[in-house]
Image (cartoon, rainbow, N blue to C red):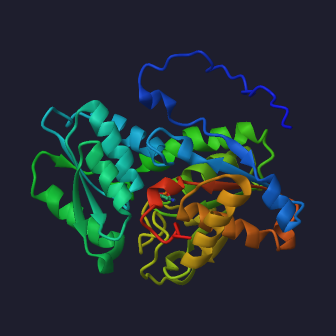
């Protein structure tokens, strides 16, 4: 016979508060201890997950998208004819389309065709246009196409997430501060995937001002080891490596690079759903797999390791993350 205790909710200052609009709910995502994983891996390391699917449009990209669009709207060239044309592997596209629905700005997202159909549908759901580019050209193909479209349209602007310093600043001002505060300064290591490099650069820069000894571990796809081997290739860890070193990535912040195969990333994402009840996306599987490798090294064996989980599993129903069995 079960003894049902009443559900308890942590009391926060937000309880009972009405938000003025949905954008006010960006950030303040939970930092969650992966206790069962720690036990299973038999480690002294403290593994803490920064769970970014709690953001209102579903991913870590809500933070920089909001900052970049707010900056654009405050700029002198913004007017009621302005349109946004942006290259994205998807999550930035979803976040931007969501915000453009709220702020009534026309938007076109240029996305490589092999990014999940869920992303493309969400962009359209928020009223955005989608233009796809060939898989073989990777994210670079989408970036080039977006540039071409912007050049041909006098009202169009790009947020240029790969080159816009507002991208990483948004992470310094929100993601990093939250990690520092919620871990009570105990964070020793950050494990972070690299797409635009906005998360890594922004979080790492800020954390290092608080604690210069913090180690920054960059995660990239094994079949597209642009940072570790200078080689680009096709991969299925959506959101990671665009096949070039992004302008805003500050590589001097990186202590170590871990490469993860598509299969290992998917397996880790599947495992954490069943072990800890965290339904996360493929890049989160990659950062989790990387963390599990790191703790085998004595340097990391007893450290407090914050792992970025960038988005949720529901953006990947159509991909090999979901099996039929
Ligand atoms: N994971 C996922 C699922 C993403 O969409 C992104 C953003 N491209 C990242 C990781 C990497 O984030 P960043 O662009 O800040 O490097």
Residue 310, placed above or below residue 175: below
Q: At 68% across and 69% down in the image, what residue appears?
A: 290
Vertical arrangement, residue 76 with respect to residue 270, above or below: above
Tell me which corner region of the image, top left, top right, bottom left or bottom right, holds residue 28: top right
State whether residue 103 is above or below residue 274: above
| Image quarter of the N terminus | top right
Q: Position of residue 163 (x, y in %)?
A: 38, 57
Tell me where residue 38 appears, x and y as whole percent. Answer: 83, 60
Q: Which x, y percent locates residue 292? A: 75, 68
Question: 116 or 142: which is nearer to us?
Answer: 116
In the depicted view, which residue is nearer to us: 99 or 322?
Answer: 322
Report whether 54 appears left or right of 12: left
Residue 255 appears anywhere in the view: no
Q: Position of residue 100 (x, y in %)?
A: 28, 38
* Residue at x 21% of width, y 35% of height: 78
Taking depth in this image into account, of 241 and 90 the one nearest to the observer is 90
The quadrant where residue 266 appears: bottom right
Can residue 10 be seen by looking at this rendering?
A: yes
Q: How many dots with numbers? A: 0
Q: Nearer the viewer, residue 73 or 165?
A: 73
Outermost residue on the front side: it is: 1
Vertical placement of residue 252 versus 22, above or below: below
Does 263 sit left or right of 165 as displayed?
A: right
Q: Quadrant of residue 116?
A: bottom left
Q: Residue at x 46, y 63 (%)?
A: 239
Q: Where the C terminus falls, by quadrant?
A: bottom right
């Amino acid at each position: 016979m079960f003894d049902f205790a009443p559900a308890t909710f942590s009391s926060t200052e937000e309880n009972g508060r009405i938000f003025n609009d949905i954008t006010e709910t960006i950030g303040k995502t939970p930092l969650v201890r992966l206790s069962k994983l720690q036990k299973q891996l038999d480690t002294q390391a403290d593994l803490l997950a920064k769970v970014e699917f709690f953001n209102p449009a579903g991913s870590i990209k809500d933070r920089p998208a909001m900052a970049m669009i707010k900056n654009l709207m405050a700029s002198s060239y913004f007017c009621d004819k302005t349109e946004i044309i942006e290259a994205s592997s998807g999550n930035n596209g979803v976040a931007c389309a969501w915000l453009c629905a709220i702020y009534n700005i026309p938007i076109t997202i240029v996305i490589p065709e092999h990014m999940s159909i869920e992303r493309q549908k969400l962009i359209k759901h928020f009223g955005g246009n989608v233009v796809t580019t060939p898989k073989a050209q990777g994210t670079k193909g989408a970036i080039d196409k977006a540039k071409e479209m912007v050049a041909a349209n006098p009202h169009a602007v790009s947020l240029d997430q790969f080159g816009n310093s507002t991208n990483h600043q948004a992470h310094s001002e929100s993601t990093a501060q939250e990690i520092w505060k919620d871990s009570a300064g105990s964070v020793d290591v950050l494990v972070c995937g690299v797409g635009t490099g906005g998360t890594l650069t922004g979080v790492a820069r800020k954390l290092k001002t608080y604690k210069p000894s913090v180690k920054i571990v960059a995660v990239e796809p094994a079949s597209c080891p642009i940072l570790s081997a200078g080689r680009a290739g096709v991969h299925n860890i959506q959101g990671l490596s665009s096949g070039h070193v992004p302008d805003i990535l500050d590589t001097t912040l990186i202590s170590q690079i871990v490469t993860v195969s598509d299969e290992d990333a998917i397996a880790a994402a599947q495992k954490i759903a069943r072990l800890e009840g965290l339904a996360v996306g493929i890049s989160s599987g990659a950062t989790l797999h990387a963390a599990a490798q790191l703790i085998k090294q004595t340097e990391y064996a007893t450290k407090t390791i914050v792992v970025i989980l960038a988005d949720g599993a529901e953006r990947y129903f159509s991909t090999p993350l979901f099996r039929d069995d």
